[in-house]
Amino acid sequence: MLPYHTLEGAQVALGRGLTLAETIWFKYSANKPDFVLHCHNTLFLCLFYSIAPIPFVLMELSGYEKLNKHKIQPSVKRSFKEMFKCYKDVMETFVIAVSPLQIISYPTIKWIGIRTGLSLPSGWELFWQLFIYFVIEDFSNYWIHRMLHCKWAFEKIHKVHHEYVAPIGLSAPYAHWAEIIILGIPSFLGPALVPGHITTYWLWFILRQLEAIETHSGYDFPWSPTKYIPFYGGPAYHDYHHYVGGKSQSNFASVFTYCDYIYGTHKGYQYRKQMRKKNSTDTFIAQNYKMDG
């Protein structure tokens, strides 16, 4: 809850006029307790999970040939019933595991210093904090993900997520409730080490969820803007990890690929890419040879 009762009071306290964004933030948050603002994360989690995968669901149901050629595992088809079951199971996990975690983590949020007041972060501050969050989460998630592929952890926890050998956007957070909590640690680590404004905190979790949905979408579009992000893994990269399954010792990266390259856990994927490229070249040569003959 903001310590100012009026816009004029906020302007006096800051010693300047409010920006448009700050005015909107004041009107929205002035009378809301910090606990309520903190719990918005669960609301955004459910909202964006419900909306963001819809285009991929429609693509899957349409069977449109021009879209299907961009599907990574085109032989696998999902019905509406299967996809809705995935959605329902994930939402149940959110209610059972994520919501209580949000509630009990509130004192920690206050302790580390995530603020709710004015002023709002600048665009430059927002960019660098989000970049740092992605890097910290990516590195720590890599090692936890590798740990989850140990025999015991995989059999008891991680194999639930790998039920989708051909992932879909809705399956991004489909996992054992314990995995949701365990992988929440890397996501929270960045804001804990570099605390900022709660709007940055919200945006971080929204962007991370959207990235996970795209990575699990099962579609690899050449025009995707994420292809211009350096070291970004993307759908084809992560799809290989699901395709190999429990025995996979490759492509553990959550967002970027540098850890896989540094620690040598990209070799299986690289070999498969090379073999596919070779087979495509051989097929092309054979077809042209036949035409020439």
Image (cartoon, grey):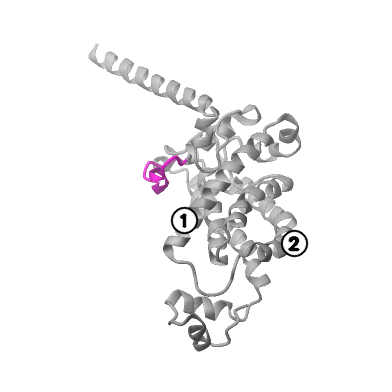
Against 131, residue 165 (above or below) is above
For label 1, the residue is 128
Residue 227 on the magenta segment: yes
Q: Position of residue 179 (x, y in %)?
A: 70, 45
Q: Are marks 2 and 1 in contact (CB under 8 Å)?
A: no
Disc nearer the start of the sequence (2/1): 2
Residue at (45% x, 80% y) in the render: 18
Q: What range is drawn magenta here?
A: 220-232
Front in this rendered view, residue 237 or 87: 237
**In the rendered image of this protein, does residue 258 appear above or below residue 172?**
above
Quarter of the image that includes the N terminus:
bottom right
- Tell me the CA gap for discs 2 and 1: 28 Å
The kind of secondary structure element at disc 1 is helix
Magenta: predominant secondary structure element? loop
| Pointer 2 residue | 104
Rendering coords of residue 195 (x, y %) = 58, 60
Q: Residue at x 67, y 51 (%)?
A: 90
Front residue of 110/26: it is 110
